[in-house]
Amino acid sequence: MASKSLAHFTHHLDPPFSLIESSKSMDQLKQIHGQAIASGLIETPIFLNKVISFCCMNKFGDMDHALKLFDQIPEPKTVFLWNTMIKGYSRIHSPKHGISMYLNMLRQNVKPDNYTFPFLFKGFDRNVGFSCGKELHCHVVKFGFGSNVFVQNALIHMYSLCGQMEMARWVFDISCKTDVITWNVIITGYNKTKQYNETSKLFDEMVKNGVVPSSVTLVSLLSACSKLRDLKIGKLVHEYIGKCEIKPNLILENALMDMYSACGEMDVAIGIFDRMKTRDVISWTTIVSGFINKGEIDLARTYFDQMPEKDYVSWTAMIDGYIRVNCFKEALILFREMQALNIQPDECTMVSILTACAHLGALQLGEWIKAYIDRNKVKNDVFVGNALIDMYFKCGSVAKAKRVFFEMPRRDKFTWTAMIVGLAINGHGEEALSMFFEMLRASIKPDEITYIGVLCACSHAGLVNEGRKFFASMTAEHGVEPNVAHYGCMVDLLGRAGHLQEACEVIKNMPMKPNKIIWGALLGACRVHKDVGIAEMVAKNILESDPQNGAVYVLLCNIYAYCKKWDSLHELRESMMHRGIRKTPGCSLIEMNGVVHEFVAGDRSHPRSKEIYSKLDNMTRDLKLAGYSVDTSEVFLDIGEEDTSIAKGWCWLPG
């Protein structure tokens, strides 16, 4: 007995194409096809073409099944059928199979038509485009499609995809330039390769050529303005939209908001947001990111909490916002909320969370993130690797940082720089310098951050002469102009080694005004080497620009105490009391069982503060019994008498 589907076939003279097109799965399609073959009612090339088209074009399609049916069709096959197969491989991003199909088509003496190359190029990735693009471009010319607008657009897209904008521009320049799509493709290419200034120039040229821009053109131009922070051009685009009465759509409104947000015009961005008839998650995230960029984290959080729907991009933006304003604990809390809602983070989220772990010294949580990345196959690219290296170094786990470095399949200059800086701050100065020389052997050009790590390594290792040589060779050998951070490293290097006068000369000869960090490095060296004269000069320079800097007063008091200059100490303390200056209390962080605990001098707000202070009292008693005594050479002015012994440290008195 014929099935319902076959009964339907018998009532139609033509093949039941509608049944094929309405299929909801490959199983359903195969059933229809099988019934047709079994009944002998339908087995025509047109029917097979329709089945193959479904396999190639439909979201439920299957290219393996398409190829199986394709091979059953006798030669010669039509160019339409070859194009269908090529288009199918492009749809599933399998360019090598598409190229193979194209070459087989040529072997069967079937000539391509004006659809073949656009279908073929659409599936290319960067690598395939780079390796095969120019050769296939020759085929385009050979078969006479060099002036076909659709093929030209496909070529421009292909060259843009693999970063060959000179070739893309050459194709564009020989095109007729009457099709708005051609302009959109080249403009999009410049945006993707971050050549935003070219986007703006092309738009002017486009208007002069009398080509009316589409909303796609305007979105691309607004994107370029956003990246360039070009409010002037952005406003002109906005005016153009109003003047030409271009119907607003969600994508265009989002692009306008993004441009104004990037340029710091949040009032205008909010105005557009409030007038929008429809908003999506991108609209909300744009506003959140705009407030984050302005440093208004509370407003950003307000809009974030109001979002009707959040995706991983929204969560990552808010987490990154907290990182930017050094609210690392808040970032971790938000990440835990994200996890509780089963929202899958991406590699950008991981980088932000690893940054928070690095600043908090949260090694256990950082290890959990590393395991999460491995377990969930989160894209572990060079950025994630760099963040892992930074986290391990800042948590003091040198061996694990080195292991990540050696396991990375690809490294960039930031990877090498992270290793050099990390080794330096962990006291492995000579190893950091060895890493620097290895970086040069790998033909990686150092930048200003790399040299900060190199000079820091020299400072920690006490390699004064080497530091001088590196500082002198920065510009001559690698074209890196020293900035204020490099001068600060030199002052620190010379100060640690006791060359205080030379450090003063470095500051005196700086081409820019020294900041308080540089003066602070020299003041710290004065404390170590007990140089009151230079210390007073340095303190005067800092306090001229920052008269309420309590840390400078305390450090100078300590130097006076070291050198037993009691009158100067008393006078400075009186000045502090008169001005109401107190040093900001220091804090320390420890991590236990994945929870970060913060401790501030004199603070009793911790839920277990009673136990903590009891333990400190016991430790103090045990230290005294063991023969230790308080080192009172430094005087701290902002702690109570009961905390003095803990804060000042202990020295051994031989019994």
Image: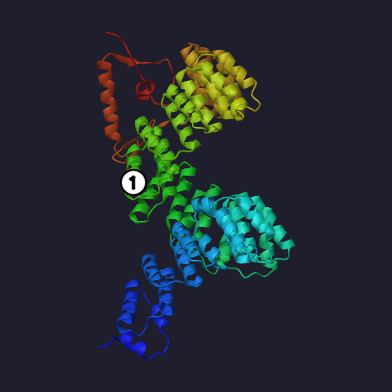
Q: Is residue 102 visible?
A: yes
Q: Is residue 575 visible?
A: no
| Quarter the C terminus occupies | top left
**Label 1 residue SS:** helix
Residue 113 x/y as whole percent: 56, 68
Residue 385 x/y as whole percent: 41, 40
* Quadrant of res 66: bottom left
Asked whether, in this view, residue 595 is left or right of residue 514, the answer is: left
Check the image and name the residue furthest to the right: 208
Residue 2's place in the image compared with 163, above or below, is below
Residue 161's place in the image compared with 632, above or below, is below
Question: Who is closer to the viewer here, 284 or 154?
Answer: 154
* Quadrant of res 157: bottom right
The residue at 71%/58% (across/down) is 204
| Quarter the N terminus occupies | bottom left
Residue 624 x/y as whole percent: 28, 17
Number of callouts in the render?
Answer: 1
Check the image and name the residue furthest to the bottom: 11
The residue at 57%/59% (across/down) is 139
Asked whether, in this view, residue 381 is left or right of residue 157, the answer is: left
Question: Who is closer to the viewer here, 626 or 260?
Answer: 260
Question: Who is closer to the viewer here, 234 or 448?
Answer: 448
* Quadrant of res 488: top right
The residue at 53%/28% (across/down) is 451
Residue 381's place in the image compared with 95, above or below, is above
Residue 230's place in the image compared with 542, above or below, is below
Look at label 1 and name its amino acid.
Answer: Asp
The crowding category of the residue bearing disc 1, from other C-alpha atoms within 10 Å (few below 14, some 14 to 19, many at least 20), is few
* Residue located beneath label 1 in the image: 374
Residue 108 x/y as whole percent: 48, 66
